[in-house]
C-alpha cells in the first residue's frame, strides 16, 4: 500500500520546492511584476532611447571627440541606461521587503538567495531588452561598429556583467532602506555616476580636480572596454579592470544581501 | 516524536530592547480546532504568532508546532504551517490565479497540480469570477480571502491567521467568518488572533486571553463566561426616587447603571430564591421594580473583567 502516499493529489512533499525551483519561480514572478509595472517599463524602455537621441543630436554638434560623436557616445549611453535600469532593482526589493509578501515567502522557505536571484535575473532580462533597443535605434541613425563577432560578444558580456553587478548592489540598497522613495533616491546616484567618466566627453577635457575620480571610478573601465571592443580600438587593461570591479561588486553585494536579508527579515 | 497537540508552548519570553513583550507564555492547542488568541492592542498577539510561525525567535522557553521544535526544526515546521498576516501578502500586479499558482509551486507542487489546487481554492473562497483579474482590483475583503487561500495552498497542518478581519467592513468580515467556519472540521488547525471579541465567540472552539505578555485565561468561550460571574440581572425601575433608593441599597453590588433608562444591573447566578430575596430587599412594597431580565455575560464583559482582575494583581 505504499502507493497511497503518492496517490494523494496535491500532497506537498517536504520541505517544499527545492532551491533551484524556488529560484525559477521567483524569476518568473519578478519578470511578470516588472512587465506589468507599465510606468516603470515605459520609462526603462523609452528613456534610454530619448537620452541617446538627446546626446547625439542636441549636444553632439558642440562636442568634439575626434570621431563621430554618435560612435563615441553610444557605449556611454548603453552603460548609463543599463546602470539606471539596474538601479531600479532597489525600488522593487524595497517594495517586496516592506510588504506582507516577505513573511509569506519566508514561511515558504524562500531565502535571500532565491529572492536575489529573482530580482537580479529579471533585471538582467529587462536591461538586455532595453540595451538591444538602444543599439537598434543607434544603428538606425548611423552607428557603425567595426567589430567582429568576438568584439560584439565581449561587449555584450561585459555589459551584462555590469548590469548584474549594479542590480545586485541595488538589491543591497533595497534591503537597507525603508521606503521606496529612499530607494528611488539611490537610483539617481547610479544614474549620475557615468557623467564624471569618459562616457560623454573625454576625461582630458574635465577640470583637473575631477579627473582623478573620473579615471578611477568603476564606470570608466566598463565604458572604455565596451568602446574599445565595439570600435576595435585597443582598450589596454580596461577590460580586466572592468571585470575586477564588477566581479568584486557582485561578490560583495551577494554576501551583503544574504546577511541583510536574514537580519531584516528576522526582526520583529 | 509526534504529539497530539498542534502547538505546545512553555514559558515563552521575548523582549524588544527593554520592552518585555512576552513574559512566560504557556499554551497548548489541540489539533484540528479553531483556536483564538484574544487580546487588546499591544498584548503580544502578533509577536506570539511570529514566534510560532518561525519568523521570530523567542528569547526563552520552548515552542513545538505540529510536533516539531520551531528553533531546531525550522525548515520542517515551515513546510507544515502557513501564515496569513495582518498585511495582505499577495502581489497586487498578479491575478488571483497567478498568486495562488506561484505559492503552490513554491510549496513544491508540480505546475499542473499547482494550477488545479489554485482552481479548487478560488472556488472554495468564492473568487472564481475574479480569478483572472489582478489582485490590485480586488476589494479589501476579496484580497483577504485570496490571502487566506494562499496560506492554504500547501495544505498546512496549522494555519496562523493574524487579525484576519481587521480593517474590513461588516459584510466583508461576515464573509470571512463564513470561510473560516467552513475550514473548521477540515482537519487543519486554525490559530487566529483577534481583538474582536465577537469574532472569537463566533469562530473559536477555544479562546485564550493574552494580556501584557501572558495568558490570563484559556478555555471554551462559554466556560470563560461562567468563570467571571456568569450572568447579569438587569432591573428597570418605575421612578427616579425608586432608582435612587435601590442604588443606595445595592451600592457596590451594582455592576452598572443607566440613570436615563432607570436601569441597574447586578451579578447573579440565576438562582430563583436569591433573585426573589434581592427583589424583596430593594423593593419591599413591590412597586419600585418595573421589570427584570437575566442575561448571559457577553465575552466583552468577560474580557474586561479578566483584564481588570489581571491589572489589579500587579
Image: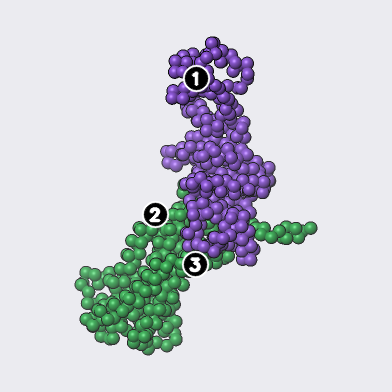
Chain colours: A green, B purple
Q: Secondary structure at mark 1?
A: strand
Question: Do dots 2 and 1 share one subunit?
Answer: no
Asked whether, in this view, residue B220 is left or right of residue B197, the answer is right
Q: Quadrant of residue A76?
A: bottom left
User: Is residue B173 something that shows in the picture?
Assistant: yes
Mark 1 against mark 3, which lies toward the viewer? Answer: 1
Q: Are marks 1 and 3 in contact (CB under 8 Å)?
A: no
Q: Chain of mark 3?
A: A
Q: Secondary structure at mark 2?
A: loop
Q: Considering the image in quadrants, where does the N terminus of chain A appear?
A: bottom right
User: Which of pointers 2 and 3 lies earlier in the amino acid sequence?
Assistant: 3
The Cα atoms of the two marked residues, 1 and 3, are separated by 69 Å
Residue at left offset 60%, top offset 60% = B118
Q: Quadrant of residue B229?
A: top right
Q: Which residue is mark 1?
A: B237
Q: Which residue is mark 3?
A: A32
Q: Are marks 2 and 1 in contact (CB under 8 Å)?
A: no
The percent position of residue B215, horizontal first and vertical second, equals 55, 34
Q: Chain of mark 2?
A: A
The percent position of residue B180, horizontal first and vertical second, equals 59, 47
Asked whether, in this view, residue B15 is left or right of residue B188, the answer is left
Amino acid at each position: 500500500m505504499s502507493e497511497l502516499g503518492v496517490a494523494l493529489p496535491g500532497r506537498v512533499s517536504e520541505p517544499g520546492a527545492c532551491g533551484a525551483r524556488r529560484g525559477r519561480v521567483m524569476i518568473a514572478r519578478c519578470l511578470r511584476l516588472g512587465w506589468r509595472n507599465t510606468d516603470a517599463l515605459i520609462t526603462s524602455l523609452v528613456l534610454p532611447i530619448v537620452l541617446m537621441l538627446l546626446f547625439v543630436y542636441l549636444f553632439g554638434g558642440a562636442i568634439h571627440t575626434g570621431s563621430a560623436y554618435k560612435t563615441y557616445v553610444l557605449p556611454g549611453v548603453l552603460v548609463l541606461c543599463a546602470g539606471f535600469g539596474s538601479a531600479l532593482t532597489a525600488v522593487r526589493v524595497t517594495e517586496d521587503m516592506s510588504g506582507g509578501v516577505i513573511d509569506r515567502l519566508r514561511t515558504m522557505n524562500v531565502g535571500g538567495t532565491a529572492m536575489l536571484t529573482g530580482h537580479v535575473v529579471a533585471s538582467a532580462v529587462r536591461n538586455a531588452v532595453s540595451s538591444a533597443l538602444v543599439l537598434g535605434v543607434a544603428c538606425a541613425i548611423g552607428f557603425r561598429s567595426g567589430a567582429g563577432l568576438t568584439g560584439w560578444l565581449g561587449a555584450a558580456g561585459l555589459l551584462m556583467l555590469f548590469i548584474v553587478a549594479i542590480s545586485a548592489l541595488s538589491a543591497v540598497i533595497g534591503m537597507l532602506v525603508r521606503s521606496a522613495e529612499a530607494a528611488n533616491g539611490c537610483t539617481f546616484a547610479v544614474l549620475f555616476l557615468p557623467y564624471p567618466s569618459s562616457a560623454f566627453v573625454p576625461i582630458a577635457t574635465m577640470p583637473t580636480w575631477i579627473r582623478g575620480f573620473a579615471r578611477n571610478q568603476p564606470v570608466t573601465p566598463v565604458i572604455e572596454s565596451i568602446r574599445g571592443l565595439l570600435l576595435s580600438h585597443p582598450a589596454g587593461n580596461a577590460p580586466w579592470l572592468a571585470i575586477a570591479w564588477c566581479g568584486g561588486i557582485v561578490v560583495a553585494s551577494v554576501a551583503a544581501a544574504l546577511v541583510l536579508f536574514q537580519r531584516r527579515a528576522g526582526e520583529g | 516524536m509526534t504529539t497530539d497537540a498542534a502547538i505546545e508552548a512553555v514559558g515563552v519570553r521575548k523582549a524588544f530592547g527593554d520592552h518585555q513583550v512576552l513574559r512566560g507564555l504557556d499554551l497548548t492547542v489541540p489539533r484540528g480546532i479553531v483556536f483564538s488568541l484574544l487580546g487588546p492592542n499591544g498584548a503580544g498577539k502578533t509577536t506570539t504568532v511570529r514566534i510560532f510561525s518561525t519568523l521570530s525567535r523567542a528569547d526563552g522557553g520552548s515552542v513545538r508546532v505540529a510536533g516539531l521544535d520551531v528553533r531546531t526544526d525550522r525548515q520542517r515546521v515551515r513546510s507544515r504551517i502557513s501564515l496569513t498576516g495582518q498585511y495582505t501578502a499577495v502581489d497586487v500586479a498578479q491575478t488571483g490565479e497567478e498568486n495562488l499558482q506561484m505559492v503552490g509551486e513554491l510549496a513544491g507542487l508540480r505546475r499542473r497540480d499547482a494550477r488545479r489546487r489554485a482552481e479548487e481554492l478560488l472556488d472554495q473562497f468564492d473568487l472564481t469570477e475574479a480569478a483572472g483579474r489582478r489582485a490590485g482590483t480586488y476589494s479589501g475583503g476579496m484580497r483577504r480571502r485570496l490571502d487566506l487561500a494562499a496560506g492554504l495552498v500547501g495544505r498546512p497542518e496549522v494555519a496562523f491567521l493574524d487579525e484576519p478581519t481587521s480593517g474590513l467592513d461588516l459584510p466583508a468580515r461576515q464573509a470571512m467568518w463564513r470561510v473560516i467556519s467552513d475550514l473548521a472540521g477540515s482537519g487543519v488547525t486554525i490559530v487566529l488572533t483577534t481583538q474582536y471579541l465577537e469574532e472569537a465567540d463566533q469562530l473559536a472552539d477555544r479562546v485564550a486571553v493574552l494580556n501584557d505578555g501572558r495568558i490570563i485565561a484559556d478555555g471554551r468561550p462559554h466556560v470563560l463566561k461562567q468563570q467571571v460571574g456568569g450572568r447579569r440581572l438587569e432591573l428597570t425601575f418605575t421612578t427616579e426616587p425608586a432608582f435612587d433608593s435601590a442604588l443606595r441599597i445595592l451600592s457596590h453590588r451594582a455592576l452598572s447603571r443607566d440613570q436615563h433608562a432607570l436601569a441597574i444591573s447586578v451579578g447573579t447566578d440565576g438562582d430563583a430564591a436569591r433573585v426573589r430575596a434581592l427583589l424583596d430587599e430593594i423593593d419591599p412594597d413591590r412597586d419600585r421594580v418595573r421589570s427584570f431580565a437575566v442575561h448571559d455575560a457577553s465575552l466583552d464583559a468577560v474580557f474586561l473583567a479578566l483584564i481588570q482582575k489581571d491589572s489589579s494583581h500587579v
